Image: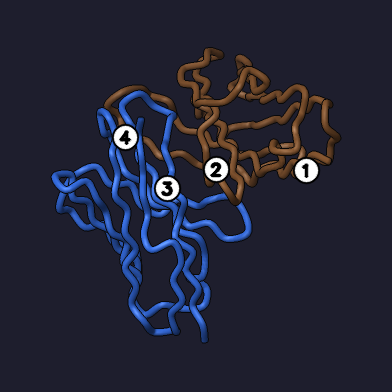
Chain colours: A brown, B blue
């Protein structure tokens, strides 16, 4: 079974621009979560989508948004980029069966974003 | 707010040594605790722990959870240079998809 894929793998943008990152989950997985990883802040949860709906949200400003399509693929958008947005953005998928069901999240390779 | 604290932050050992990594947590409506290994790429899953006192084992790695004292340990015996990585601990609350991660323990194994 193919793993989680993320595109692009690397991206360089300038301040003020916007960016869209894409994530394709493992086939059959319906939950997609996004994380930001930086050396200073570690791995921080952004949001989780399930069945095209945002189910959980972390503590990030409104410039960070996402969506999920009917095939479970997800996109994450960051508008008005700031230098501090430079990070590795990781996507993880899981079955998404719901509360009480133990699940494992499988991570994609990440998109490394550099904001100049 | 959910919180995960890992210790030590970094560790340097020699091949053949045994190491113990610690993870303590505070979470509302705990569901599971997970360990990941991260090298120069995305984290890879190691263990998921949901019940106290039951050791999970995979080769030289093992882990156990104490839900009363709110901590977990990850043991690596007979370490090898390939074990060098950042080991991340995460806790999941009820409601799938959201994990809170610790800052990780950077393990360096010298030949």
Element assignment for label 4: loop
Q: Which residue is mark 3?
A: B102
The residue tagged 4 is A102
Specify the subunit that label 2 lies on.
A
**Mark 4 residue crowding within 10 angstroms, few (<14) / some (14–19) / many (20+):** some
Which residue: 52% across, 43% down?
A43
- Whether residues under marks 3 and 4 lie with C-beta atoms below 8 angstroms apart, the answer is no
Q: Which of label 1 and label 2 is nearer to you?
A: 1
Residue B54 position (above or below residue B75): above
Q: CA distance from mark 3 to mark 4?
A: 20 Å
Q: Would you say residue A30 is visible in this rendering?
A: no
* Label 1: element kind: strand
Q: CA distance from mark 1 to mark 3?
A: 24 Å
Image point 30% across, 29% down: which residue? Answer: A101
Residue under label 2: A107
Task: Give whichever of discs 4 and 2 has the lower sequence position.
Answer: 4
Q: Nearer the viewer, residue B77 or A26?
A: B77
> To which residue does mark 1 refer?
A114
């Amino acid at each position: 079974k193919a793993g989680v894929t993320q595109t692009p793998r690397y991206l360089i943008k300038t301040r003020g621009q916007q960016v869209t990152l894409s994530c394709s989950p493992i086939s059959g997985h319906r939950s997609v979560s996004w994380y930001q990883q930086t050396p200073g802040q570690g791995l921080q949860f952004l949001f989780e989508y399930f069945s095209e709906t945002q189910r959980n949200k972390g503590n990030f400003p409104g410039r960070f948004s996402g969506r999920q399509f009917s095939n479970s693929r997800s996109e994450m958008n960051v508008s008005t980029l700031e230098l501090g947005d430079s990070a590795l953005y990781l996507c993880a998928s899981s079955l998404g069966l719901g509360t009480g069901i133990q699940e494992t999240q499988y991570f994609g390779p990440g998109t490394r974003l550099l904001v100049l | 707010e959910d919180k995960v604290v890992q210790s030590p932050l970094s560790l340097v050992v020699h091949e053949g040594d045994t190491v113990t990594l610690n993870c303590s947590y505070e979470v509302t409506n705990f569901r599971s605790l997970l360990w990941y290994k991260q090298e120069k790429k995305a984290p890879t899953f190691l263990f998921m722990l949901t019940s106290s006192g039951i050791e999970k084992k995979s080769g030289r790695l093992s882990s156990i959870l104490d839900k009363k004292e709110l901590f977990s340990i990850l043991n690596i015996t007979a370490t090898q240079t390939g074990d060098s990585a950042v080991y991340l601990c995460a806790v999941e609350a009820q409601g799938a998809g959201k994990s809170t991660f610790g800052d990780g323990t950077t393990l360096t194994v010298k030949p």
